[in-house]
Protein backbone atom coordinates (compact mmCIF):
# COMPACT_ATOMS: atom_id res chain seq x y z
CA UNK A 1 0.00 0.00 0.00
CA UNK A 2 1.30 3.43 -0.88
CA UNK A 3 1.64 6.22 1.67
CA UNK A 4 -0.95 8.37 -0.10
CA UNK A 5 -3.48 5.55 0.24
CA UNK A 6 -2.86 5.42 3.98
CA UNK A 7 -3.45 9.12 4.46
CA UNK A 8 -6.53 9.36 2.23
CA UNK A 9 -10.13 9.15 3.29
CA UNK A 10 -10.96 5.94 5.08
CA UNK A 11 -13.70 3.77 3.58
CA UNK A 12 -17.10 4.23 5.16
CA UNK A 13 -17.49 2.23 8.34
CA UNK A 14 -20.08 -0.51 8.46
CA UNK A 15 -23.29 0.77 10.03
CA UNK A 16 -24.81 -0.62 13.21
CA UNK A 17 -27.81 -2.04 11.35
CA UNK A 18 -25.52 -3.90 8.96
CA UNK A 19 -23.47 -5.30 11.82
CA UNK A 20 -26.60 -6.36 13.68
CA UNK A 21 -27.82 -8.12 10.54
CA UNK A 22 -24.57 -10.08 10.24
CA UNK A 23 -24.70 -11.07 13.91
CA UNK A 24 -28.33 -12.20 13.66
CA UNK A 25 -27.52 -14.23 10.53
CA UNK A 26 -24.49 -15.82 12.25
CA UNK A 27 -26.60 -16.75 15.29
CA UNK A 28 -29.25 -18.27 13.01
CA UNK A 29 -26.55 -20.31 11.24
CA UNK A 30 -25.31 -21.59 14.60
CA UNK A 31 -28.84 -22.41 15.73
CA UNK A 32 -29.37 -24.44 12.57
CA UNK A 33 -25.95 -26.13 12.84
CA UNK A 34 -26.54 -27.23 16.43
CA UNK A 35 -30.29 -27.96 16.31
CA UNK A 36 -29.75 -31.64 17.19
CA UNK A 37 -26.67 -31.18 19.40
CA UNK A 38 -28.11 -29.70 22.61
CA UNK A 39 -26.04 -26.52 22.31
CA UNK A 40 -26.77 -23.19 20.66
CA UNK A 41 -23.46 -21.38 20.07
CA UNK A 42 -19.95 -22.01 18.81
CA UNK A 43 -18.53 -21.20 22.24
CA UNK A 44 -20.29 -24.26 23.66
CA UNK A 45 -18.71 -26.75 21.28
CA UNK A 46 -16.98 -29.74 22.81
CA UNK A 47 -13.86 -31.19 21.18
CA UNK A 48 -16.14 -33.66 19.36
CA UNK A 49 -18.22 -30.78 17.98
CA UNK A 50 -15.10 -28.90 16.96
CA UNK A 51 -13.81 -31.85 14.93
CA UNK A 52 -17.20 -32.18 13.24
CA UNK A 53 -18.10 -28.54 12.60
CA UNK A 54 -14.70 -26.88 12.18
CA UNK A 55 -12.89 -28.72 9.39
CA UNK A 56 -9.87 -26.84 8.10
CA UNK A 57 -7.66 -27.18 5.04
CA UNK A 58 -3.89 -27.63 4.86
CA UNK A 59 -3.18 -23.90 4.80
CA UNK A 60 -5.17 -23.38 8.00
CA UNK A 61 -3.46 -26.37 9.62
CA UNK A 62 -0.07 -24.90 8.77
CA UNK A 63 -1.02 -21.54 10.25
CA UNK A 64 -2.25 -23.18 13.44
CA UNK A 65 0.83 -25.36 13.75
CA UNK A 66 3.04 -22.31 13.36
CA UNK A 67 1.02 -20.34 15.92
CA UNK A 68 1.06 -23.24 18.38
CA UNK A 69 4.83 -23.48 18.15
CA UNK A 70 5.57 -19.75 18.07
CA UNK A 71 3.19 -18.84 20.90
CA UNK A 72 3.54 -22.04 22.93
CA UNK A 73 -0.19 -22.69 22.84
CA UNK A 74 -1.97 -25.64 24.43
CA UNK A 75 -4.50 -28.04 22.94
CA UNK A 76 -7.18 -26.05 24.75
CA UNK A 77 -6.00 -22.86 23.00
CA UNK A 78 -6.09 -24.73 19.68
CA UNK A 79 -9.75 -25.57 20.26
CA UNK A 80 -10.54 -22.00 21.29
CA UNK A 81 -8.91 -20.66 18.13
CA UNK A 82 -11.03 -23.01 16.02
CA UNK A 83 -14.21 -21.89 17.81
CA UNK A 84 -13.38 -18.24 17.19
CA UNK A 85 -12.44 -19.01 13.58
CA UNK A 86 -15.84 -20.69 13.09
CA UNK A 87 -17.55 -17.60 14.52
CA UNK A 88 -15.59 -15.25 12.26
CA UNK A 89 -16.55 -17.42 9.28
CA UNK A 90 -20.19 -17.33 10.39
CA UNK A 91 -20.10 -13.54 10.59
CA UNK A 92 -18.89 -13.51 6.97
CA UNK A 93 -21.59 -16.03 5.98
CA UNK A 94 -18.84 -18.46 4.97
CA UNK A 95 -19.58 -22.17 5.12
CA UNK A 96 -15.85 -22.89 5.32
CA UNK A 97 -13.22 -21.74 7.76
CA UNK A 98 -10.52 -20.07 5.67
CA UNK A 99 -6.97 -19.01 6.42
CA UNK A 100 -8.04 -15.39 6.96
CA UNK A 101 -10.46 -16.52 9.67
CA UNK A 102 -7.78 -18.56 11.42
CA UNK A 103 -5.29 -15.70 11.13
CA UNK A 104 -7.74 -13.28 12.72
CA UNK A 105 -8.51 -15.72 15.54
CA UNK A 106 -4.80 -16.30 16.19
CA UNK A 107 -4.33 -12.53 16.29
CA UNK A 108 -7.00 -12.24 18.97
CA UNK A 109 -5.37 -15.04 20.94
CA UNK A 110 -1.98 -13.31 20.66
CA UNK A 111 -3.47 -10.06 21.93
CA UNK A 112 -5.14 -11.92 24.78
CA UNK A 113 -1.83 -13.43 25.86
CA UNK A 114 0.01 -10.11 25.52
CA UNK A 115 -2.40 -7.88 27.38
CA UNK A 116 -4.07 -10.15 29.92
CA UNK A 117 -1.37 -12.63 30.89
Image (cartoon, grey):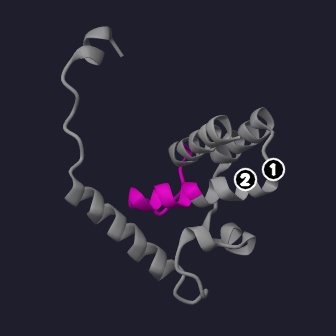
Q: Eyeballing the image, is 12 above or below 4?
A: below
Measured as percent of width and height from the top left, residue 40 is found at 52, 80
- What kind of element bears circle 1? loop
Which residue shows up at 67% across the image and 74% down it? 49
- Tell me the distance, in whole angstroms, between the alpha carbons under discs 2 and 1: 6 Å
User: Which residue has dot 2 on it?
Assistant: 78
| 2 and 1 marks in contact (CB < 8 Å) | yes
- What kind of element bears circle 2? helix
Q: Is residue 86 magenta?
A: yes
Q: Eyeballing the image, is 48 above or below 58?
A: below
Q: Residues within 10 Å of mark 1 (few under 14, many from 20)?
A: few
Q: Quadrant of the C terminus?
A: top right
Measured as percent of width and height from the top left, residue 104 is found at 53, 43
| Magenta span | 84-99
Residue 74 disc label: 1
Quadrant in the picture for residue 50: bottom right
Quadrant in the picture for residue 116: top right
Is any atom of residue 22 visible in this view? yes
Q: Quadrant of the N terminus?
A: top left
Amino acid sequence: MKFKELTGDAPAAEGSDDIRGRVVAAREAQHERFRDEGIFANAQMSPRHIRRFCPIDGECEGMLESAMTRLGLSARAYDRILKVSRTIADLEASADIRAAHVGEAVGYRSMDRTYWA
